[in-house]
Each structure stands twice: as structure tokens, then as C-alpha cells.
Amino acid sequence: MDLETLLSYPWRIMLPEFVIVITAALLSLLDLFWKEQASRRPLAWIALAGIGLAVLFLVINAGQPVQEILYETFRLDGFASAFKLIFLLGAAIVFLIALDRDFGQQLPYQGEYYYLILTAVLGAMIAASSADLITLFVGIELLSISSYVLVAIRKHNLKANESALKYVISGGIATAVTLFGFSYIYGLTGSTNLFVIQERLSQGVNDGLLPLIALALLVSFVGLTFKLSVVPYHMWAPDVYQGASTPVTAFLSVVSKGAGFALVIRFLMVTLQGMADSEMILWENLAGLLVTVLSVLAALSMIIGNTLAMRQTNLKRLLAYSSIAQAGYLLVPVAAGIALLQTGEVSASNLFHIVLFYLAAYLFMNLGAFALVQLIGKETEDIRGLAGLYRRAPGKALAMTLFLASLAGIPLTAGFVGKYYILMGAVGANLYALAAVMVITTVISYYYYFGLAVQMYMREPEVDQPLTAPSSLNIVLSVCVIGTLLLGLLPNLALDLIQTQFNLLEVFLPYSH
Amino acid sequence: MNQIIVTVLILSPLIGMLLILLTNSQQEQQLKRMGVLGALIPLILSLWMVALFDFNHPGYQLTQEAPWFQFSPPGGEGVLSITYAVGVDGLSVAMMLLVTILSVMAAIASSYITARLKEYFLLFFLLEIGMLGVFGSLNLFLFFIFFEITIISAFFLIGIWGYVERERAAYHFLLYNGIGSVAMLVAFVMIFMKVGSLSLPELASAFSNTALAPWFSSAVFLLLLFAFGVKLPIFPLHSWMLRVHVEAHPAIVMIHAGVLLKLGAYGLIRLNAGLLPAELERFSLFIAVLGAINILYGAVLAFRQRDIKRVLAYASLSHMGIVLLGIAAQNESGLTGAVFQSISHGLISALLFFIVAVLYARTKTTMLDELGGLAKTMPLLCGFLMAAGMANLGLPGMSGFISEFLAFLGIFNTYPAVGAASLLGLILTAVYMLRAVLATSFGPLAEKWSGLTDIRGFEWIPLVVLTALIIVIGIYPAVLGDTIRLAVESVGHGLLTRMGG
């Protein structure tokens, strides 16, 4: 690659990523020269400013046509932009949660903490923007490795050590599985570019290579489920969520999971789309198989997540199981999308709307809940820590009630509209059994979400003092309350935004010079 | 005003909430006064709505509609819209009146509550918004939202202010009703995706004009039957309702037995009978048998209970069976009977549970073994109890008689055998009701009850008002007749023309 080619690339499409890289580098340098004992909270503010700038560039880039640089590996399309917006918003909220002063003082490596969150976000962004298996893999690895360190960063904490070790080992296995699947795909197609793979796989189907193709896709997908924390790679979540510091847990549950969905959808949808033109019967077999596998995994995640969450007494473990179930719900529109691709429906794009809308709803409700866990967690992480919260801090108890109601899918909240939309997707794709599992497990989830509400309103607190929060947490709670309510009451605000600003169908659009 | 009266009525409990919020939580008396005052506002507005209502016009009126939001349907073209649409017909007017009247009575009964009054009344008014909203919604999405609001607020009302086992009762309530409401949600999503609308006036014509796959209409019908069957409740989905009757505070049970169970009846009449008459015909024998089982099972078990609250709980179960019979009859008298029964039972059960509240406030027990001979110390209260009991067993001259008569008239036309079997239940009703009333009022008076005071002060209001309503409807059913005739004409249009033609 000579200089001329390099200079000819429209680098501005990568501006958000550049901003994050530069901010992360700047933070690491500042951290070196910062006074040893001084608080590193200003670094978090710099990081926030960086994220703000990245969002700005992202929005400026959003209207642009599809572009690819670096030999068709990095790609700007509406799909990537929409997901990146969610990652950046999530990261910003995570920073606000981490800005809690008491929390910062207990952190051994405050500076590292902040810039590792940035590199993790960078990984998520690259993964969402990849049109090539290599960059896609580099993206998730950057995200994963940053996350491993973030979980382990409280190295004098026994729980943190245990969870970090579990995280690295199971993450490593998942990575190996993913790469194994990718190697099959490369072996079958001789390419790592998603669009080339799309073409050659459809030829492959016609040449009778269906079993191998199915194996390759399934193995890759199963490896990727690690990031989604759905069955079969869900077991790490409770331990890691419990051991990691709350902001990192919040990050894993929203940004990291969102990145997982971005790349699973792109990987599956783009590679499979070409096969819609292949020989019909064979294609139906393959799509049918994938829909079945995805449906079973989604159903299992909902069942396991929701039933095990009922037995938890630790708040973060409970939210971990809840997040496994939530990922199960999010997998429903992906399965529906493949089922609709099978019938050749272009309106599969509406399924991307569903995923994005639910992710946005999940961002607000889940981060809001974690902000409260961060506050309560200073006393205890047991669910009894919520006891009598209504007496100690009525406003926060009401906010938490809203987040729980939204997670449970109670009307007038973002979570309800999201779930309703997911159900529409399932019914539209005739996945009735999956819809049934979803609604029944939703009722099971009432048990533990309302169990937390029972603590807040019907139990006596152990310490009967008013609970005050630092202003950064108050900001997070307010933002999340507003987001949850707005998306619940006026969902068109978000739906129209997604529709007009981000053309999600561009994910299917091959780039031509 | 015609445009916005229904919206104003649905949201009017917010004024009550505001009054409560502005009152200091230490001033208990003031809070209770504000609670009653707040409940009076919707009552006045509902009477105003009746004044604006045109009794010569079947179908929805006083409607208001505004676009709300749209979904892009997965696997379809265009957009699917959700509108904010409210309005009333005869059925909803009658039910909304029931809500506002019983809310005032329950607010008065709330005087027996001593703890956390402020939160209690806030949730109470939220519950009232939910109930009014369910009956006023002309869009199923909106219907579902209000339906869920009643579940959430009732969960807390049962779980915080009930008796010893209140939290278990609240969880049972939540999980059973949760399952019911998600079944309803799935049915609504299916309708939304295949028919393309959730607006009730549009659906009525859409269902009769579009050719829908038979499995689809059957699935929707059965899902809705299940959803409202949990709420009504239909045997064997009833266990939650017994717990709530026994463990919740009587003021809440007044609302619960008086209105919340009727959400099930309303749903069955409005959606199952109103939108899917062909499916109703197909499943009518099934529903009639379910109704007969409800009547007999409830009556037999009511006879065996030692706690007066449990007697009344099983009595409710038994009486809801009559609603099912009326619907299964698929004719005018049956449907009229079902609607009549919903309202009449609402008034009677509220009266009975208010009497229980008065009794419990004095004796701290509701066990039949421990009570007895109370007519000596509380002749007036026992008089009201006797009257309510008579109304409940369907004595002519009281509202219960009219509804049972009409429902049975209907079912004898359609399924005489089922009707005959159910008649046995009516005899049992007389037995268990008299047993409960006699065990409370007569017999030897225990020493400890000798000093009890009879009805006093505010307690007169609900007793007199509810008894008067029950008798007025019983003697002169035309008061309700007009609204109900309208209701049957508009809701049952598809059903009745189907049977006629």
C-alpha cells in the first residue's frame, strides 16, 4: 500500500474512531505525568469530552452514502452508525456512573480504568463497522481484552480476581470457537470479505456444500454468542457481573452486548442474504436450520435467565441473569430476520429497527438500574440493600421502579414498546412458539423484578438514613428516567430518528467505487 | 366538552392524587377526607357524561381520537398506526358509572386503614384511572395499557395493606393476571399484524369483512378467553382470586370483586362476543359448561367455608358463572343478563365486603364459628347483611334476580340441559348465603361481642347507597335497562344478526 492510496482514502469516515483513539492515547500520557496521589477524575471528564466529539462526527457522517476504506475492510453505513451511536451513548453514561467520587478513590488504577473503557468502545465501534472477518475479529478482540483488564483491575479484590480469570478463560474458548468457524468460512470461500463470502457461499450452496456451510456459520455464531451472553455462552455472566466493579458491569451489559448484536446481525444477515437467490429448497433447509437454532438458543436464554434470576440474592447476579434473558429477547428479531430473508422480504430491515429500538430502551433502563446499584452497592450488594429505599430516597425508589417496570415490559415504558415490537416481529415471521416462550418467561420475570420493588416499598430499611447520591449519579438517573419514559410514551421520536437518519438496509449494500 | 369528556373523566383521579400529594402525611383525617373528595370528582364527571350521552344512539359516542405513533411492520408493507382513541357506548357508560360509584364507597371504607395513607390513596387513584381507562378505550393498545395499570396498582394495594398473607396473595395475583394479560397481548399483536388495526370501531367491520384463516380467529378467540377467564375468573384459573378476597383489605376487595373481576366480563362481552361472534358460536357449549362448573363448584365450596370472606369469594366465583352462561346463550336476553349480572354483582359484592369491613373493624375476626348472635348488638348491620344476602341469592325485587332471570332465560333457549344443571347452583346459593347470614346474625351471642356498637357516622353512606341502588335496579330495571339495551344492541350487533339470520 503506497502513500498515494493511503491519502486517497476518505479518512473522515473514520473520524469518530480517530477521536476515541486520540483521547485514549492522551489519557494514557496524562496519566503518566499526573501527580501520583492526585485524583484522576479530570481524566474522566476529558474522556467524556472525547466521546461527545466522536458523537458529533458520527452524526455529521451519518447522512453519507456507503463508503469503504482500507481495502474494503472498514465500512461506513447507516447500520454501523446507528449502533455506534448506542455504544458511545452507553459509554458516556458508564463514565458518569464511574465519576462517583467515593468509588474513584477506591480504584487502584483510576487512569487505566478510564482509557481502557475508551479502547473497549473503540473495539466495539470497529467491530460494528467491519465488512471483513479480520477487522471484525480485531474489533471484538480489542473489546474483549480491554474488558478482561477492566474486570481484573481491582486486583486486591478476591471476587474480581476470580471473575476475571473465569472471564479470560471462557472468553478465550469462545474466541477459539469463533476463529475455528471463520477458518471454515475462509476455507470454503477463500476470502474474508463479507460480500465476497456472500457470493461464494451462495455458489457453494448450489454446489452441494450445504452441510459444511451450515457448520461454518453455526460454529462462528456460537462463538460470537459469548459477547451476547446468551446460551450456550452465558455462564460467565453472573460471576463476572458480580466480581467486576459496577460501571464495568454496566458497560459489559450494554455496550459489549450491543456490539455482539451488531456483529452477529451483520455477519449472519450479509452472508446469508446472497443465498436467497440460490436453489430454493437448499436455501430453505439452511435458513430453516439457522432459524431453529437461533430460536432454541433465544428460548433457552429467556428460560434460564429468568428462572435462575428468581433465586438470586445478590443484585448484580440478579441483573446478570436478567441480562441473559434480555439478550434472549433481542435474539428473537434476529431469528425473525433470517426467517423473513428466507421468504425474500426486504422488510427484514424493520427487524433491525426492532433490535435498535430495544437496545436503546435497554441502554436507558439497564444503565439506570446499574446507576442505582452503584449507589446502593456502597453499603451492600445484597437485594436487601434496597429495603426501605422508598423511605430513604423516594425519588430514587420511583426511578428504580420505572427501570424495573421497563425491564419487565410494563406499559408506558420503553421496555414495553420494545417488547411489543419484538412480538410483532415474531408474529410477522410466524414464530409463534418463540413468542409464547417470550411472553411466559416475561411473566416469570415479574416475580423477581417486582421482588425488588417489594424490597423498596414493603420492607424496613436496615439503616434508616436518607440516601444521597453524587450529582453525576443523579444526572445518570435523570437521563435514564427521561429516556425510558420518552421511548415509552413517544416511541416515534426514536423510531423516526432511526428511520430517517440511519438507513439500516445499507448493511446489505455492496460498496462500488 | 363532548369531545373531551371521556378523557377528562379517565384522568380525573389525577386531581385526587394532587389533593393527596398536597396534604401532609401526618394528618390522617385530612388525608381520608381528601381521598373521598378525590373519588367524588370522577363520580360527578361520570354523571355529567351520562347527561351528555345520547340514549337513542347505539354505537360509540363522545369519541375522541388522536394519532399516537406508528410501527413499521416486520414482514409487511407501510406502517401500522396506534391511535389514542376513547369513547363510550351503553356498556362502557354503565361500567364506568359502576367504577366511580364503587370508588367513592371504597374510599369511604378506606377510613379503616391506618398505615401509609398517603401512598394508599395515590395507588387507589392510579387504580381508578386504570379501571376507567379500560372501559373508555377504543383502541386495544390503550386498553392493554390501562389493564396493566390496574394490575400494577392492585399488586401494591394488596401487598402493602392486606392481612397476614398479603404478599403471597399479591404475588399470586400478579403472576396469574400477568399470564392472562400476556395471552391478551399476544392476541392483540396477532390482530395487529394480520388485520392491521387495533381500533375497536374499525375491527368490528374488519373482522366481519376480511376472510381470516379459521385457525387464526380460533387462536385469537381462545387466547382472549383465557386472558379474561383468568380475570373473571373461570374455574380452574381462580385460586388467585380466593387469596385476594381473603387477604386484601376489604376496601380493596370492594373494588376487586366489584370492578376488577368485571374487567374479565367486559372483555368477554366486548371482544369475544362483540368481535368474534362466529367463534363464540363454535365454542359456546364449552363456555356454557365452564359457566355451569363455575356456578356449581363455587356454590358447593362456598357451603363448606368457615370464613365469611371465603364464603363470599366462592360466591363471587359462582356468580361469575352466570355471566358465562349469559354470554354462551348468544341471544339478547342472555347477553342482557350477562351485562346486568356484571353490574348487579359489582354492587352486591361491594356491599357485602363493606359489611365485612365494618364487622372486622369491631370484632377483628371473620370466622363464622367465632361470630354469632350479632343481631342482638348490631341489629342494623345485620339487617343490611340480610338484605345483601338476599340480593346475592337472587330474591325477586333486587338486582340479582333480574340478571339471573335473564341469563337463565337465555341459556334455556340455547342449551337447556346446561341451564337445568346450573339451576341446582341457584338453590345451593340460597343455602350457603343463608347459612353465612344466620351464623353471623343469630344464635347465642359470645360474651366478648356484647359491647359492640352498631352502624355509626360515615358507615351509613355506603350501606344505604349500595342497598338503595340494588333495590332500585331490582324493582325498576329500566333505570339500567336503557343503557344495557343500547349496550346489547351495539356490542351484540354481529352476534344477534348472526343468530337472527
Image (spheres, coloured by chain):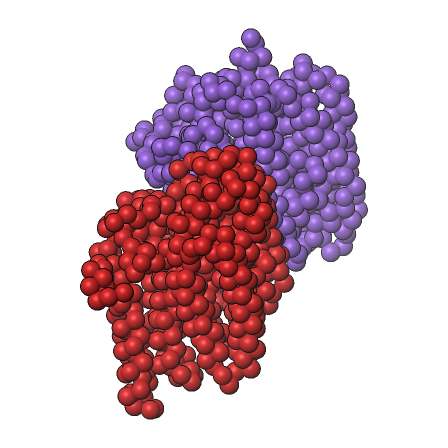
Chain colours: A red, B purple
Q: The N terminus of chain B lies in which quarter of the figure?
A: top left
- Near-viewer residue (A439 or A119): A119
Q: Residue at x 51, y 65 (%)?
A: A175
Q: The C terminus of chain B lies in which quarter of the figure?
A: top right
B320 vs B81, left or right, is: right
Residue A450 drawn at (x, y percent):
54, 57
- Near-viewer residue (B129 or B272): B272
Q: Is residue A137 visible?
A: yes
Q: Residue at x 48, y 22 (%)?
A: B207
B341 vs A475, left or right, is: right
* Count of marks, rendered view: 0
Quadrant of res B26 = bottom left
Residue at the far bottom: name it: A36
Q: Residue at x 46, y 66 (%)?
A: A252
Q: Residue at x 34, y 31 (%)?
A: B64
Residue A395 drawn at (x, y percent):
40, 63
Residue A382, compared with residue B182, is above or below; it is below
Residue A174 drawn at (x, y percent):
54, 64
A58 vs B333, left or right, is: left
Quadrant of res A112 = bottom left
Residue B11 drawn at (x, y percent):
38, 42
Q: Is residue B35 visible?
A: no
Residue A380, compared with residue B88, is above or below; it is below
